[in-house]
Structure formats: C-alpha cells, structure tokens
Image (spheres, rainbow, N blue to C red):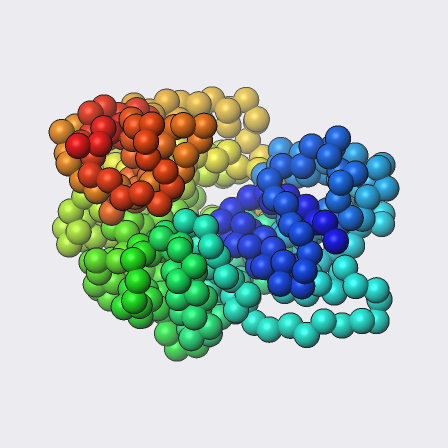
Amino acid sequence: MKVFIETYGCTLNNADSDVMDNILQSAGHTIDRGTLRLNDAGKYDYIILNTCTVKKPTEQKIISKLERLSNLNKNIVVTGCLASATPNIVKKASPTAKILKTSETIKILNTLVPEGQEVPIAEKPSFINSNGIIARIPISEGCLSSCSFCETKYARGPLKSFDENVILKAISRSINNGSYEIELTSQDIGAYGADKKTNIAELALHAAALDGDFMLRIGMLNPEHLHKYLDSLIEALKQDKVFKFLHLPIQSGSNKILKDMQRNYTTYDIQYYFDYIRNKIPDITISTDIIVGYPTESIKDFKLTEELLFGIKPTITNISKFWQRPHAKASKLQQINANEIKRRSTKLSREIREMQVLQYNNFKGLREEVVVTENNNGLVSGRDIYYRPVAVLSKELTVGDKVTVEIVDSSYACMISKPI
Ligand code: SF4
C-alpha cells in the first residue's frame, strides 16, 4: 500500500514517525513524508497524521486538515499527542479516522490489516534503522514531572525508559547506514533511566564509546534533574563524539512562576548550572525555552525573566506564548489578556534577537570543521562541534561532506562561513 505520514511538533514526534516509517517499509509498504497537498491525497491508500497538542494554532491547523481529508473519504490514522489527549476532538473532525495512542505507534501495522489480524511487535526503538544524515533515536516516553502548563504529559503519561542495549543497537545500525548526527530524543531526556537505575549521562557515555564516525546530540532536559548527575553529564559532554550542546528549558525567570508551573528548580539553580557548566566547557551552546504570559505572570515576573536572560545569556532562546490546553492545570486559572501576552512576547523576542546576533558575531574569524547536514535549494548548512548552525557559502558541497570553514559573518539564526 502507499502511505503518507504527515508529522507535527517536536523531535520525539518525528522519531515516532521514523518508527512507523521503518515498520511499514519493512512490511513492504511505500511511504512518503512531508506536508500532504490535498490534490495529492488520491495517490495514497492511507494517510497518517502524527499530531501535536502544545499550541492551539497547531491544533486548529491539524483539525482543518483532518476535516478536509475526511470529506475526501480517505483512510486516515491519527496518532500523536492530540489524538492521545483529546480523541473526542479528532473523532468530531473525522468520525471514521482510526486513533492510535502515542504509546502504540509500534502497532501501526495493525491499523492497516483487517480487524482480528494481529502483527507481532517489539520494543521501541528496535525498529529504528535510519539511513539519513540525521538519525532520531527515541530513548523514553513520558516523564516524571507534572508541569502545570503541559498537555503532553497527559498524552504520554508516566516515564518509560527504553532498554539501553536496544538504544545502543539502534544507534549502531544508524551509524552503519551512514547517519552522522545521532539525536537522542524524548519528552524529557533528563528523566531517562530513573525507572531503570541509570541516567542520561551513563547512556551518553556508553553511546559515545561506540565505533564509527558520528556525533551525539543530547536533547531537551528539564533542569530539575540536573543535580542528580551534573558531573557525569559534563564528562559525557566532554567526549569527542558528543556535541557540546545542552537544551535546558527554564521557562521563567521568576521563582514564583516556576513554583506555580511546578518546575521544581529555582532561578538560583539555573544561574549556578549555567556558570558551573560554562566553567567546565567554555563555549558550550546552551539553548533554552521561555513561556510568556503564564496566567499568574505579573509585569514584575516578566521583568525578572528578562533580567535572568540578560544575565545568563543562553545561546538560543525559544519563546512561546502561554496557550490554554484542555487538561493542563494552568488552563483553569484566570488568563492574561491576549494582547498583553503578545506585547510581552514581541518585546522579549526583539531583545533576544539583538542578544543572539551579538553572540554569533563574536565568532568572526574562527576556523573550524563543519559537517553539512542540509542543502536547501543550494543553501548549504551544517553544525560545528558546539551544535552551532553554520551556513556555508559554497555551491560544491553536498550533505555529509566535512569541510573546514572560516566564519565571515553572522545573522540572528546562524553563523555564515566560507570554506578554506
Ligand atoms: S517535563 Fe514538564 S513540560 Fe516536559 S513533558 Fe513532562 S510535564 Fe510536560
């Protein structure tokens, strides 16, 4: 059969789509991925929408697509966090769509075979067999936290870490198939292993010791877990085959809001971690996420967030407006006016933009190695060992090439380089 997979949301969702892609291909089906144009829907026997529930606008986009596909009488499978958290919304948009929970993506084949026929399944990520330059390896599902703004927790449930040997085998297979950038992904990488008496630092150290030419990227890690293994994580980050990169979503610079969000760390912890990690690994890239307009966020709390960011200067800051989600505790609170949230978000985005342009500016003249991971219509880019995005001014390079470059300029989003 011909199947189209359309994916919304985070790296973990993309990794789940990789799992479904691998399972379906090994059963002989043909898979296309990307964004499906309605005019092309007729070419496919099944359409899989792997959905996200984090933001309201994304939900509206998914529901609109689902309604239009449903009107075309297509066979549809809806999986991902929106389908798991709010199946009623999905059913309303498409009463005949099959719903597959996030924990059941490994059962994707069963949605394509006649009722009653069961296909044997194994554990994630044993299906991952990536042959692209980037391999996304899911290492766990669910998390240990109960953040009051989060709907994903409702969709993915409590922590379930996958077996380390299964993960290491999936990584080795991907390296042997030609993948270079190995992304360990999860809802919260920081929680990995708490249910198996291990942790992300141990896993990363073991993965970094595997044979082959690759770099390991450690994904999003809730800072509440850092104190459990900070020094071993730093040791893992120092390994040659690990990107000097951390994604620590701090969400707010106000201790009151962090408490309301049930984040289990303070701004003092954050300042300590940033200083400590940068002292051990100078130039490390630390990326963070901020939510603007949490219902109890006052102007003073917002200013504290600005001050914290000016102080710790994350390399990359992603800003999201607070969105009311059906099962999130914070959705029941009195909300801040949408225009005020927009004002705060626009102000912070402008300030971050100015800060980031200046940060990349510091690297002008630097010579370093970059591995090309993207070629978008002749615009070539890759990552250095600090996982910094580097555009390369060259027409001759292709994905997978390793090249030594000199940084000649910078923009808000990346450094710009020339091969030397
Ligand atoms: S750590 Fe918090 S924000 Fe992340 S998935 Fe778990 S509950 Fe949601």
Residue 47 coordinates in the image, percent (x, y)? 73, 46
Q: Where is residue 95 drawn, in percent x and y?
A: 85, 47
Q: Tell me if 40 is positioned left or right of 182 in this view.
A: right
Q: Which quadrant holds the C terminus?
A: top left
Frontmost residue, 185 versus 349: 185
Of all residues shown, which one is farthest toward the front? 396
Residue that appears at 36% across and 52% down:
181
Where's residue 231, x and y in %? 22, 64
Q: How many marks?
A: 0
Residue at image location 22% in from the left, 60% down from the top: 239
The image quadrant of residue 212 is: bottom left
- The vertical placement of 406 against 195, above or below, is above
Q: Is residue 242 left or right of residue 17?
A: left
Residue 258 can be seen in this image: yes
Instruction: Answer above or below: position of 74 versus 409.
Output: below
Q: Residue at x 39, y 77 (%)?
A: 197
Q: Which of the 4 image quadrants contains residue 400?
A: top left
99 to 32, vertically: above or below: below
Q: Look at the image and tell me whether residue 60 can be seen.
A: no
